[in-house]
Amino acid sequence: MYLYKNPKYYEIAFSFRNISNEVDFFEKAIKKFSKVKVRKIFELASGNSPYLEEWHKRGYKYYGLDLNREMLNFVEARAKEKEIKTRLFRANMNKFSLGKTKVDLIYVLLGSLYVKSNDDFFNHLDSVAKVLKSGGLYVLDGVVWFNILSDNKQRWTISKQGIKIKTTFRAKVVDPTTQIFREDVILDILDHEEKKQLRSNDIRKFFFPQEFLALIKCHNKFKFLGWFDNFDINKPATPKGRQIVVLRKK
Ligand SMILES: C[S@@+](CC[C@H](N)C(=O)[O-])C[C@H]1O[C@@H](n2cnc3c(N)ncnc32)[C@H](O)[C@@H]1O
């Protein structure tokens, strides 16, 4: 069974995050770098929209975009239940538009940049630039690789609501020339008495730090402002942390 068509299990498996702390980082980045007043926040590859309730609590309006109908339905139902006004879009993050609507900040989480080449990346940046106000931030979590050419394998287990999920994550370099890697995620689930397994296998391009900077310069619609470790605005990125890049639209 495909992981992203099962938002309930995805949400439990990826609930290791400290949402309030992560959103604090965004507010600090806005204060430090944004040149626009921020009210409309837009998440790309939004999945289960993990920050939805936190943004709402802090007075922001949340927009999300994802390819998967199941993820969008899941978020729509939650927003309705919690009486949160939101706008959700089903589209590819490499070619999208919101008509005349512009947002004040855009972000991706957990390395969810689904591009296979630099051309895809430029198309993606063109779409982001069309929708983001000038002076607004684009924040990318886990997109730039600081652990040069090493395969990344992680395992963790989370139990909630009578459901136990063992997650195995592996990012394996498939072709060093095109810088393509395969991300395999396997969820081994024990839902009360029932055993299930969910998987996803996505092929994507990875970006080295200096390559990423050169591409941003060459694309020319964004300014690089910094990279940070583990949602700490005072800590520059290191190979060991979760690295977050902050760009601003020119
Ligand atoms: C790892 S999940 C991230 C979900 C959420 N942002 C989070 O932080 O937990 C990746 C999401 O990207 C979506 N996705 C994959 N390829 C996409 C694409 N080309 N355009 C938009 N969404 C995509 C999947 O449906 C999935 O919901």
Image (cartoon, helix red, strand yellow):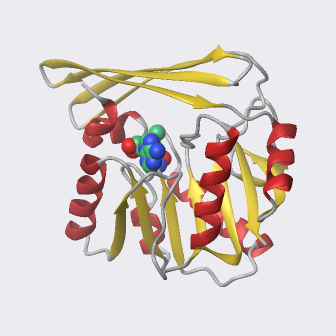
> Residue 234, percent across and down?
83, 55
Q: In the image, 75: left or right of 216?
A: left
Which residue is drawn at the image coordinates 74% and 19% (left, top)? Answer: 177
Against 9, is 88 above or below? Answer: below
Which residue is drawn at the image coordinates 51% and 44% (left, top)? Answer: 17
- Nearest the eye: 155 or 145: 145
> Residue 221, percent across and down?
77, 65
The quadrant of the rendering that contains the C terminus is: bottom right
- Report if residue 24 is visible in the image: no
Which residue is drawn at the image coordinates 66% and 44% (left, top)? Answer: 119
> Residue 172, percent across and down?
60, 16
The quadrant of the rendering that contains the N terminus is: top left
Q: Quadrant of ligand 1?
A: top left
> Residue 99, percent across and down?
45, 77
Which residue is drawn at the image coordinates 43% and 68% (left, top)? Answer: 63
Against 169, is 27 above or below? Answer: below
Q: Quadrant of residue 180?
A: top right
- Report if residue 161 is visible in the image: yes
Q: In the image, 10: left or right of 129?
A: left
Against 11, is 103 above or below? Answer: below
Q: Quadrant of residue 120?
A: top right
